[in-house]
Every structure is written in C-alpha cells, then in structure tokens.
Image (cartoon, rainbow, N blue to C red):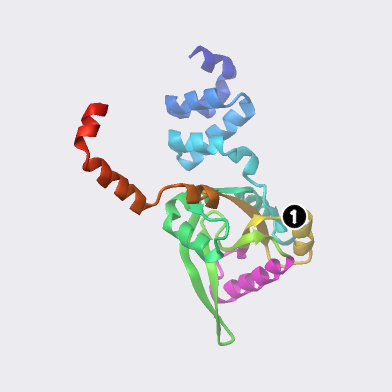
C-alpha cells in the first residue's frame, strides 16, 4: 500500500484509472513497471480490454507498449483521419506467436493451420475488435478462384481485414498481391456501411526501407508486420534424444529386473 501511494501521488489519476482495477492487477503493475507513464497506459488497456491479471502480465512481458502501432503502413497517405490513426494504433510489430511450435522450414499453410488451431490465442495477440471470418476464404474474380489466408472483420474500424502470411522476408511483389486482394474484397464483400478494407502482410522479417518503397504509391491501405515463433527443437538436439521405441525397450528392461530396483532403493 505504501508503494502504491508513492507511485500515484495524484489522487485524480488514481480514481480515473488504477483504482478501477483489482488489487492483484495493481501489484503486477508496481512490480513489473518503473515508469508511471507505462503503468497508466497498461492500466488503461487492461480496463478497456477486460484483461485478467495473467493477460496483463503477458502483455507487459511481451512489451505491448512498444509493439502497438509499430507496423510499417501507408495508412496516413490513403485513409482519412481519424481512421488512419486508429488503424495504425491497432497494428503491432512484431506479433508474438509463441503459442505455436513450428520447424524452421515450415510453410505458410503450416503457419495458417497453427493459427486457426489456436485462434483464441491469436485473437488475443491481435487485440480487441478482431472477429475471425475464416481461412482460405474463397473469392471468385473473372471466373477464377482466389483464396485469402485469413479474413477478419474489425468492429472498431468497421472494415474487413485481410492477413496474408509469409514465412520468409517481405518482398515488394507481396504488396501488389495484397492490393489485388483488397480490391476484390471491396468489390465483392464490402457494403455501403463498411469502411475501406485493410490488408496486413505478416512475414518473418522485413526491411523497413523496402516496405516503404513498396507501399509508397499503393492506393489501398496496407500494413506490413513481422512475427516471432517458438521454434521446435533443433535437428541436432532431436537426433540426440531417445526415440519412443528406445524408451519402451528401456522400460521393459527395468520392469524385468525388480530386484535391482529394490537394491538400488
């Protein structure tokens, strides 16, 4: 309680924000953050998003304060205010997908399958307002079918959000493909009450300068972010571990020698 009083000498701030959080949330804010600005920011986000204490700690430990709004986009050039500011503030860079375990040579479809299989975790990482509409979402253009990796609708932005997954580094041609996808969704799915569709290219790595050049003259709103994964065991380490068959043989050997086990005990 003494630490709480020292951290928030302004009673007005306390009543407006941190006093509305459970006590365990406030303990986490005090223990994990030294900056008052960051504590108040996370407190406000926790209130707005309804975070549990564990989710609050996760967001602090994954540095959401720095990641939110960090995507490289052309929103300021192609979207009107305040939509451009809101859209920019909602995209992160990087996205932490530590709930997935993929090998280094995994393909986009494996990443997509993992995200759909852990859709609740992915929605939590995306943030409040994203509604999942489907994966491999089909669109027919001029008699040919195209499929979107992931399609969402954002409640606050009132627009469709397309996510295209790339397991490698961002390439300039990715933005052209996304430009086409956005145009198709705008023409085939978007209604008069919807704002312009937004596209996000989620890739393993990117050069900011390359992204900026690629988006410079694009007429559709596109953002580019990176992601991090929890990779599976390295191949050398996997080879050094015993197989299931070897473990079963060891267990059978132990079971056949009960006297040895008793004498060892």
In the image shown, does 12 or 113 lie closer to the viewer? Answer: 113
Q: Position of residue 39 (x, y in %)?
A: 58, 29
At horizontal 22% and vertical 39% (from top left) the residue drawn is: 257
- Residue 185 at x, y = what percent? 57, 72
Is 215 above or below relative to 95? below
Query: Does 234 sit above or below residue 105?
Result: above
Residue at image point 61% right, 72% down = 181
Residue 142 position within the rendered picture, expressed as x and y whole percent measured from the top left:
59, 86
Residue to which mark 1 is pinned: 207
Give the camera-side residue of 73 and 103.
103
Instruction: Identify the residue shown where x is 41% and y is 48%.
Output: 242
Dividing the image into 4 quarters, which one contains the C terminus?
A: top left
How many discs mark residues in the rendered view? 1
Does any portion of residue 20 appear in the rendered image?
yes
Q: Is residue 127 visible?
A: no
Vertical order, 204 against 1 (above or below): below
Q: Left or right? Give the position of 13 relative to 133.
A: right
* Residue 180 part of the magenta-drawn span: yes
Give the extent of the magenta segment: 172-198
Residue 144 within the segment the image draws in magenta:
no
Is residue 14 rendered to the left or right of residue 88? left
Q: Residues within 10 Å of mark 1 (few under 14, many from 20)?
A: few
Q: Main secondary structure of the magenta part?
A: helix
Residue at the bottom extreme, as displayed: 143
Could you say which is closer to the camera, residue 157 or residue 133? 133
Q: Secondary structure at mark 1?
A: loop
């Amino acid at each position: 309680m003494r630490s709480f009083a020292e951290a928030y000498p302004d009673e007005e701030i306390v009543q407006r924000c941190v006093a509305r959080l459970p006590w365990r949330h406030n303990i986490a804010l005090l223990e994990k953050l030294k900056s008052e600005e960051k504590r108040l920011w996370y407190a406000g986000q926790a209130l707005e998003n309804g975070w549990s204490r564990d989710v609050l700690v996760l967001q602090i430990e994954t540095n959401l304060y720095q990641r939110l709004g960090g995507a490289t986009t052309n929103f300021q050039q192609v979207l009107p205010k305040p939509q451009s500011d809101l859209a920019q503030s909602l995209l992160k860079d990087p996205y932490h997908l530590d709930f997935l375990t993929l090998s280094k040579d995994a393909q986009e479809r494996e990443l997509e399958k993992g995200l759909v299989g852990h859709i609740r975790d992915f929605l939590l990482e995306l943030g409040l307002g994203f509604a999942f509409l489907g994966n491999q979402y089909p669109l027919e253009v001029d008699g040919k079918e195209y499929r979107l990796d992931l399609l969402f609708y954002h409640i606050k932005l009132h627009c469709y959000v397309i996510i295209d997954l790339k397991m490698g580094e961002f390439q300039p041609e990715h933005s052209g493909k996304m430009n086409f996808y956005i145009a198709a969704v705008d023409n085939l799915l978007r209604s008069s009450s919807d704002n312009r569709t937004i596209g996000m290219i989620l890739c393993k790595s990117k050069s900011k300068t390359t992204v900026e050049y690629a988006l410079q003259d694009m007429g559709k709103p596109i953002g580019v972010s990176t992601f991090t994964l929890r990779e599976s065991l390295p191949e050398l380490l996997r080879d050094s571990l015993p197989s299931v068959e070897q473990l079963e043989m060891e267990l059978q050997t132990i079971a056949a020698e009960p006297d040895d086990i008793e004498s060892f005990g």
